[in-house]
Image (cartoon, rainbow, N blue to C red):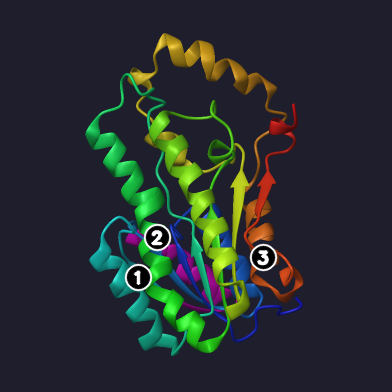
Amino acid sequence: MSKSLLNKVAIITGAGSGIGKETSLLFAKEGCKVVASDIHVENLKLLEAEVIDLGGDIAILESDISIEFDINRMIQFTRDTYGKIDILVNNAGVMDNFESIAEVSNETWEKVFKTNLEGPVKAIRGVIKEFIKQQSGNIINISSIGGLHGGRAGVAYTASKHALVGLTKNTGYLFAKQGIQCNCIAPGAVETNIGSTIDQSKITELVKDRILSGMILNPRTGKPNEIAQIALFLASDKSSFVNGSVIVADGGWSAY
């Protein structure tokens, strides 16, 4: 391996499975010191064992990105463990149940926004002053093609991921002269466990007609490692001229 992230320190949220897990493994292979955060501690322990087997350096922390106390604790834990932070990957996210604005509850709206938007906002806010001081830092937000289009999810997920794109562009632009990059990946359908959180009983005829009918246009689902490879590019020096950008990875689904 090229060790393109040698001696870098990365926080990766939602690291227990899917894209977060594959990103953690890949970063560790590339010489990065990884702080892996997730709400599922057993998954983190399995990840830790895999990274150690690879000869990598990892510290795991059970934390919930929707809770500000946990976010602050995660950032301080990273400083205490490795002495610095170079990369923040905001990967943790939750799906809605494809509810339209006519059906979505306050509970669902708040849950989705706390995880998909407020968590990344507070995590970025927690590291940005440090990044400014060291005149370097790399933020990678995992959005979705649901953040670029209107018919890939329910209203809460769609709105939260659109807002995450806006957060990315604003942060990347405003802090570019301070040596800080902030970019976004917008995956299409990827083989992760996020779909298992959807309550199928809440899928309405409207959703079946207007959203699920479009699923047949999807050429294929992606693998978590395919998204991790893009995150590696964005975290490495190879992406030095990429900032405030959104990289779509959906196998051509949204090209139709």
Mark 1, residue position: 61
Give the magenta part as a residue range.
Answer: 41-59
Magenta-colored segment: predominant secondary structure: helix
What percent of the width, then of the height, locates residue 233? 70, 65
Residue picked out by circle 3: 234
Q: Are the residues at dot 3 and dot 1 in contact (C-beta closer than 8 Å)?
A: no
First of labels 1, 2 by sequence position: 1
Residue under pointer 2: 121
Residue 42 x/y as whole percent: 35, 60
* Amino acid at pointer 2: Val
Instruction: Decide: few, some or many residues near mark 2? Use Cα within 10 Å; few <14, some 14-19, many ≥20.
Output: some
Q: Earlier in the sequence, mark 3 or mark 1?
A: 1
Judge the density around disc 1: few (<14), some (14-19), many (≥20) Cα neighbours within 10 Å. Answer: many
Which mark is in front, 2 or 3?
A: 2
Residue name at image x 62 percent, y 38 percent: 188
Residue 39 circle label: none
The secondary element bearing badge 3 is classed as helix
- Asked if the residues shown at circle 2 and circle 3 are in contact, with their CB atoms under 8 angstroms apart, the answer is no
Q: Residue 249: horizontal and vertical position, in percent?
A: 68, 45
User: Magenta stretch: residue 46 in it?
Assistant: yes
Q: Quadrant of the C terminus?
A: top right
Of the residues shown, which amino acid type is indicated by label 3? Leu
For image coordinates 55% across by 72% down, the residue present is 175
The answer to whether 217 is drawn above or below residue 243 in the figure is above
Tag 1: amino acid: Leu
For numbered disc 1, what is the local secondary structure? strand
What distance separates the C-alpha of mark 1 from that of mark 2?
Answer: 19 Å
Residue 18 can be seen in this image: no
The residue lying toward the viewer, choosing from 161 and 173, is 173
Query: Cα distance, mark 3 to mark 1?
Result: 24 Å
